Image (cartoon, rainbow, N blue to C red):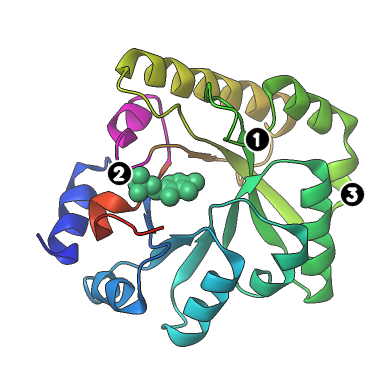
Amino acid sequence: MSITNNLQNVLQELPTGVRLVAVSKFHPNKAIEEAYRAGHRVFGESRAQELRAKHESLPKDIEWHFIGTLQTNKIKYIIPYVSLIHGIDSFHLLSEVNKQAAKVGRTVNCLLQLHIAQEETKSGFSFDECKEMLQCGEWKELTHIRLCGLMGMATYTDSHEQITHEFRSLSNFFTEVKSSWFATEPTFCELSMGMSDDYKLAIHEKSTMVRIGSKIFGAREY
Ligand SMILES: *Cc1c(COP(=O)(O)O)cnc(C)c1O
């Protein structure tokens, strides 16, 4: 199967209102160009330098999403053009993004990442930490970031029951956060959850954005 076919198969399965971030990390420009020629414009990367190099060499109408762990010293590489940062996992990181965004006169869209998996290796706020951060209210002074929603990754497991449970807990939390802090903010509307192996379950739990890599581009070499 070609990238074009894979992409079309995935797109056909997405209900209207669910957006696809094609995760192109570790894949060469050639692969992205094929998806681009098939009409896709939204790509996700997880390393700042890789994203910068791809942004410089690929068409400028690509919407780049940063989906990985963002180190504060690398924020500056992506801030001038990134359209959504999915993995904000601390107030400190949010304020660093704000600082770099202010320098270039941008307001950068961000998602807060929640730790929903039963795996220590995945990062993110706990539900309580996230509520504390929002309740504290200091984030409202960060005028160069815009909180657009939440993101999470489920445990890597065969148990559909567990994955569904984790996605549902994030989906319920999203509803709670939206009504408590963002009821009058239509831009707080994204729930980024679902990858190649679990996006159907995520959509069922009201995901608005799926991040799919290997199902489109094939296996990655790390
Ligand atoms: C790599 C990655 C994906 C895509 O994973 P696939 O299993 O290849 O679809 C999605 N989200 C994040 C945060 C990732 O790091």
* Mark 3: amino acid: Glu
Q: Are marks 1 and 3 in contact (CB under 8 Å)?
A: no
Quadrant in the picture for the C terminus: bottom left
Dot 2 crowding, Cα within 10 Å, few <14, some 14–19, many 20+:
few
Q: Is residue 103 above or below residue 221?
A: below
Q: Which residue corresponds to mark 1?
A: 124
Q: Residue at x 74, y 20 (%)?
A: 128
Q: Residue at x 9, y 59 (%)?
A: 1
State the extent of the magenta-drawn residues as a range.
195-208
Q: Is residue 24 above or below residue 133?
A: below
Tell me residue 27's x, y (percent).
35, 67
Foreground label between 3 and 2: 3
Q: Which residue corresponds to mark 3?
A: 141
Q: Residue at x 64, y 56 (%)?
A: 109
Real-space Cα separation, disc 3 to disc 2, in angstroms: 34 Å
Mark 3 secondary-structure assignment: helix
